[in-house]
Amino acid sequence: FDYDLVVRGATLAGPAEVFEGDLGVRDGVIAAIGRDLRRGREEIDAKGLVVTPGGLDPHCHIEEPSEGGGVQEESFSSGSAAALAGGTTSFICFVPQWKGHPIAATATGYEARARASRADYSFHQIITDPTPDVLEREVPALVARGIRSLKVFLTYDPLRLTDGQFLEVLATARRLGAFVTVHCENYDAIGWRIRALLEAGLTDPLQHAWARPPVVEREATHRAIALAELVDQPIQVFHVSCDEAAEEIARARARGVKVWGETCPQYLTLSTDDLAKPDFEGAKVVCSPALRAPGESERIWARIREGTLDVVSSDHCGFSFATAKRDPGSSGYGQGGAGARPDGMPAFNAIPNGVPGIETRLPVLFSEGVSAGRIDLPTFVRLTSTNAARLFGLAGRKGTLAPGADADLVLWNPDAERVLTNADLHHAIDYTPWEGMRLKGLPTMTIRRGEVAVREGVVLAEPGSGRFLARGPYALARPSGRVPDGFDAAAARR
Ligand code: DUC
Ligand code: ZN
Ligand code: ZN
Ligand code: ZN
């Protein structure tokens, strides 16, 4: 046989074009693309199916421990099964750091647990306490091991950095050729709103959105970009929820700043109407930034089409409704103390922030994007894999249909329809925010490095079969070379 596997007669959808053809796999890698390829040991008839590169989810929280003792219920085994079932063959999750502790205190155990993954995986390192030892010893060691991106929060009680600390992280990343991702919301503004809402007795899940309106996100997005521009360090703004924040990114890009923007399916499909549902159901969609007013999501789609937002991640969080959202404990993803209500439910600010979505990210985007005519197939591919691969140092290896790339493939039946329901999902969470949504276009098979990982909803990939993706230096993370007055403060501090 010339190939281990041939996918025959498919509509191949890459990041730049769509064409009919066969795809041959050898040793887990795409070996050839063309017409009438010679025989493979295994043959898949893909006539009438669309083949895309496997999804790369560059932002998901899997089995992430909080300092309060809570571990998210999603495990690496369940989370990666869900990922594969939804067409995502690799993901980047987060190694926590706790204030007052070195990175190593949390990283060693976390990295060991990640070895149970069935999908390929990498890490962003969260920095909550940028001491000289962390920045000058621990972070360089991580980057040398291929953990080449840092995540910082400008809000959340146990996580947020001051502007001064953020600048030190940016300068360190610049020296090391690492990339920085940022959660942009104004911590003090949110704290002030939360206190006023609680004092007024306004505690419903809907008030989560009132505590952090778009201006709070716009301000922090503008500030993060300004500080990154000062240091000349490339950044990505995580989970853009509103046009106000996207506008700040568009303005910065127009003047040549290396800033990128990500959004998530929740901001493209849900709204404050979902937060306002009765019987505490709104708690299911408490995430930060918050869901926006009905209609705002069409403006986010427009920001995708103009290119300002070029990655759609899940921001998957493993907080179930039965436990975490009703009896929150300390998730880390909250702010302003643990307010309770007369009915015993947590006040809006004590509900752990985050929605589960690692399995639904691609199907929801395919249905609402491609099938609904909002985006074309190459745009879908760029949003779900190619652009994240470029931003995080995996270009050529992930996110493309080209010889030499890992044979991570999703076969789609573009005409299949199904009503989405949590019972069909593989995650460990007891709900999906998209319960009852009618999907058009469904994944029928996921192939990870040439092996069938999921067939008709049955996950075949074993725990531990995923590989750690070490990432080397890459062009997108390089600074532009422009600093105010020609004085390179990050380099001078070396
Ligand atoms: N937002 C969420 O909704 N969940 C986890 C982290 C975040 O920033
Ligand atoms: Zn501690
Ligand atoms: Zn965030
Ligand atoms: Zn997140």
Image (tube, grey):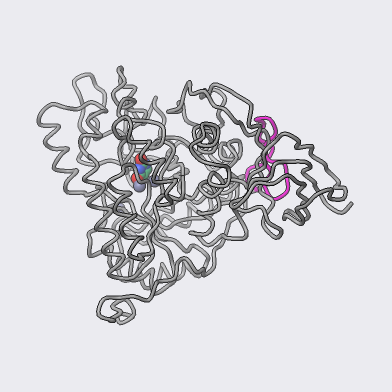
Q: Which residues are magenta?
A: 447-465
Q: Is residue 454 magenta?
A: yes
Left/right placement of residue 235 relative to residue 369 reads: left
Relative to 442, 180 lies left or right? left
Which one is nearer the viewer's eye here, 140 or 83?
Answer: 83
**Image height check: is 405 above or below 294?**
below
* Residue 43 in view here: yes
Residue found 58% across the figure and 56% down from its top: 468
Q: Quadrant of residue 274?
A: top left
Q: Quadrant of residue 206?
A: top left
Q: Is residue 221 above or below residue 87?
A: below
**113 w.r.t. 392: above or below:** above
Q: Is residue 145 left or right of residue 34?
A: left
Residue 374, image x, y percentages = 48, 37
Q: Is residue 406 above or below residue 345?
A: below
Q: Quadrant of the C terminus?
A: bottom left
The image shows residue 299 at horizontal and vertical percentages of: 35, 39
Q: Position of residue 191 (x, y in %)?
A: 17, 43
Is 490 a magenta residue? no
Residue occupying the point 31% across, 42% down: 242
Asked whether residue 69 is in view, the answer is no
